[in-house]
Image: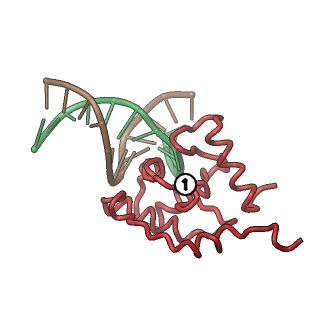
Chain colours: A red, B brown, C green
DNA sequence: CCCAATGTAGTCT
DNA sequence: AGACTACATTGGG
């Protein structure tokens, strides 16, 4: 059956939603973080320290803070950011084993990063 | 294991 | 304005 599968990214493209990211992310730092995140493709992951290298900053923890203020998870793919030591890291403001971090794992599964 | 460094936002005084 | 605090982290002692 062909028509049963939906490519979410193609569907999103069709919607042609325009986001005013500068409105939400005012500072230089946060815009750098967001721009770096938007370059990630489905199935790709990065780490807080890797983003730090790209934007020339050591504020790894602050990178998490930017993600926390992400109004639209999935469009700004904060779930593709993992800890350098392989841990899952936090999601939507929570860092321990909560439904939020579990959702993060599920998203990575869907995108094929983990089984 | 403990701890300083990092950027932002929030809460005081 | 300034001081202080909490964070989805990291690398070093």
**Residue plotted at (57% across, 38% down):** A95
The percent position of residue A78, horizontal first and vertical second, equals 55, 56
The chain that hosts pointer 1 is A
Q: Which of A24 and A4 is in front in this view?
A: A4
Please give the residue where the numbered disc 1 appears in the rendered image: A73
**For residue A27, side relative to residue A86 (left or right):** left
Q: Quadrant of residue A19?
A: bottom left
Q: Which residue is drawn at 67% across and 45% down?
A: A103
Residue nearest the viewer, comparing A49 with A67 = A67
Locate the N terminus of chain A and report the quarter of the image it occupies. bottom right
Does residue A26 lie above or below A96 as drawn?
Answer: below
User: Dot 1 lies on which element?
Assistant: loop
Residue plotted at (54% across, 54% down)? A73
> Who's the residue at 79% across and 68% down the image?
A5
**Could you tell me which quadrant the C terminus of chain A lies in?**
bottom right
| Residue A40: image location, x then y, percent | 58, 68
Q: In this view, does A53 lie to the left or right of A104?
A: left
The reply, left or right, for residue A26 in relation to residue A74 is left
Q: How many neighbours does mark 1 have within 10 angstroms: few (below 14), some (14-19), or many (20 or more)?
A: some
Judged left or right of residue A47, residue A2 is: right
As displayed, is residue C6 above or below residue A48? above
For the residue pair A56 and A94, the one nearer the viewer reads as: A94
For the image, the number of numbered tags is 1
x%, y% of residue A63? 45, 53
């Amino acid at each position: 059956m062909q028509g049963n599968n939906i490519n979410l990214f193609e569907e999103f493209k069709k919607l042609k939603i325009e986001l005013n990211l500068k409105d939400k992310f005012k500072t230089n730092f946060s815009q750098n973080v967001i721009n770096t995140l938007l370059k990630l493709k489905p199935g790709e992951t990065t780490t807080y320290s890797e983003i730090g290298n790209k934007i020339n900053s050591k504020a790894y923890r602050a990178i998490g803070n930017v993600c926390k203020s992400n109004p639209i998870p999935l469009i700004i793919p904060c779930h593709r950011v993992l800890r350098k030591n392989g841990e899952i890291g936090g999601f939507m403001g929570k860092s321990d084993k909560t439904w939020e971090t579990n959702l993060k794992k599920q998203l990575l599964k869907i995108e094929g990063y983990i089984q």
